Image (cartoon, helix red, strand yellow):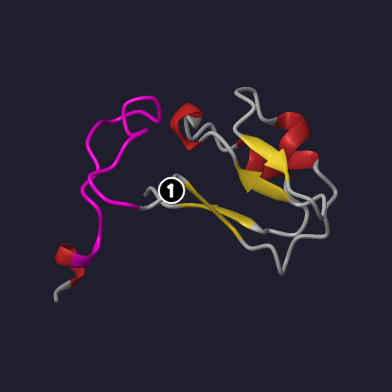
Amino acid sequence: MTDAESKPQVSGTTPEETNKTEGNLPPLNIFLHWCKGCNICIAYCPNKVLEPDRDGKPILAHPEKCTQCAICWLHCPDFAITSNYK
């Protein structure tokens, strides 16, 4: 499999347009083993995409609402959130 075949196909030129992919990848990666559970990402998310799990760490509760605004991963002090979009 080549690199092009393994990556999801993304269309659009703005975050709002690239909200969906032709694959099964969620819009965000959350590395829970890096996260200390400060919930800054949850507090700053304008679309309330993230919610705390039973341990108080963020989970992607509403991926369809994610606009890739970058607020959650830019404010994360642990660099525990990344985007699946380039």
Residue drawn at the location 26% of the way across and 50% of the way down: 23
User: What amino acid does circle 1 point to?
Assistant: Pro
Q: Residue 22 colored magenta?
A: yes
The stretch of residues the image draws in magenta is 6-24
Q: Looking at the picture, how far across and down is residue 54, in whole percent? A: 79, 51
- Residue 44: quarter of image: top right
* Magenta-colored stretch includes residue 63: no
Q: Residue at x 56, y 38 (%)?
A: 70
Res. 36 image quadrant: bottom right
Secondary structure under tag 1 reads: loop
Which residue shows up at 45% across the image and 44% down it? 27
On the rendered structure, is 74 left or right of 4?
right
Question: Please, which residue is most extreme toward the bottom here?
Answer: 1
Disc 1: CA contacts within 10 A as few (<14), some (14-19) or many (>=20): some
**Residue 35 placement, left or right of 63:** right
Compared with 58, 1 (above or below) is: below
Q: Is residue 65 left or right of residue 44?
A: left
The mark tally for this picture is: 1
Q: Residue furthest front?
A: 54
Quadrant holding the N terminus:
bottom left
State the residue at coordinates (71%, 69%): 33
Does the magenta stretch mainly form a helix, a strand or a loop? loop
- Which of the pair 65/13 is nearer the observer? 65
Q: Quadrant of residue 39?
A: top right
Task: From the image, tell me which residue sits under label 1.
Answer: 26
Residue in the foreground of this view, choosing between 68 and 20: 20
Residue 43 spot, x, y in % from top left: 78, 31
Left or right of 25 in this view: 78: right
Residue 79 drawn at (x, y percent)? 68, 58
Q: Name above or below for residue 11 compared with residue 77.
A: above
